Amino acid sequence: MKLANLTLFITGFICLTSFTARAADRTLTFGVIAKANNNPVFQVVKVSSEAEAKKLTAEKGVEVKIDWRTPNEEDSQKQAQAIEQLVNAGASGIAVSCSDPNKLTPAIDDAIAHGVPVVTFDSDAPQSKRFAFVGTDDVECGRDLCRAIAKELNNTGVVAVLAGNPNANNLQRRIVGLKEEAKNYPGLKILDTFYHKETPQDSVATVEEVMQAHPEVTGWAMLAGWALFSDRALKWTPGTVKLAAIVSHPAPSSISERATPMSWLPSRFIIGEPGPLTSFSTRFRTTNIRQTGLLKFPFYL
């Protein structure tokens, strides 16, 4: 969950502001607000954005810095406050992954009104005035996820959906795609959608609770890879419950060493400007973990 290439949006900010920067010989500071520091996915965002800032500093001759303002735990109000703080600090631009678009849209629009460009990544605020969204085609991701778990189950079974934050735009769109695609599989029953805090421990606890309450579950469709960052995951007898997940990061080797049938789906990568989003990447094929060992992925965040 997952996700966005920060290289693209930082480069976009450079294009928007490089003339001014050259004229004033100033430092460009870009605020990055991911959903939560306790989500391992966003640690990749932090590392990759800081690395890209160093690269752009060397290539463009303008000092580029990242001001990381991500809350420790997912909190849309703290994200909105961080946007306001970055505007007051004179940030050159802001990138935010929106935990709740309804709460973040006013803060984004206020930043735009103050002349600070904003892009969203990973999870959008589509009704805001952000100038671009960088992320995945989440409806198609959901469709791919449904096809993957259907394949693992030979088109028949009871599937539980692990869904993270119920307010996140990207996850809700994945659910839309999954449920639409599920109509093509009459033998596949979607039991329910189960939400949780987006941490490994909370996602694993949710899986365990559902398995105890619903032993009829034969497959899990995970909208992201939260549970795969814990050694406690997949505690059922190997082969009895199948799993498919949308991931863009490696899972621990202990997961890949287990015999549990599992498919993983790299995120479909798109860039969207205000209005309809358009496909950016070619279609990625589902890869079976039993054939690949450790998870591989086509791009970093």
Image: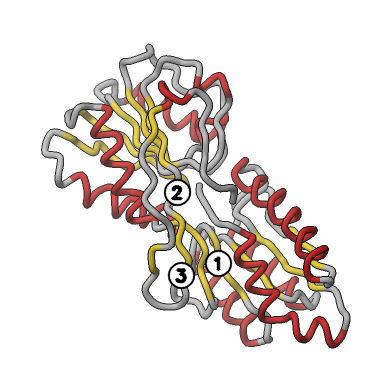
The amino acid sitting under disc 1 is: Thr
- Mark 3 and mark 2: Cα distance apart in space: 15 Å
Which residue appears at 28% of the width and 28% of the height?
A: 152
Query: Relative to 247, is 62 on the left or the right?
Result: right
Asked if residue 77 is positioned above or below residue 62 in the image, the reply reads: above
How many residues crowd around disc 3 within 10 Å: few (fewer than 14), some, or many (20 or more)?
Answer: many
Q: Specify whether residue 205 is in view.
A: yes
Image position, residue 69 (x, y; %)? 72, 59
Image position, residue 121 (x, y; %)? 55, 62
Mark drawn on residue 267: 2
Would you identify the image quadrant in which residue 208 lies? top left
How many residues crowd around disc 2 within 10 Å: few (fewer than 14), some, or many (20 or more)?
Answer: many
Residue bearing mark 1: 120
Mark drawn on residue 272: 3
SS at circle 3: strand
Which residue appears at 28% of the width and 41% of the height?
A: 146
Image position, residue 115 (x, y; %)? 68, 86
Image position, residue 281 (x, y; %)? 43, 57
Of label 1 and label 2, which has the lower sequence position? 1
SS at circle 1: strand
The amino acid sitting under disc 3 is: Gly
The amino acid sitting under disc 2 is: Ser
- Mark 1 and mark 3: Cα distance apart in space: 10 Å
Query: Relative to 186, is 4 on the left or the right?
Result: right
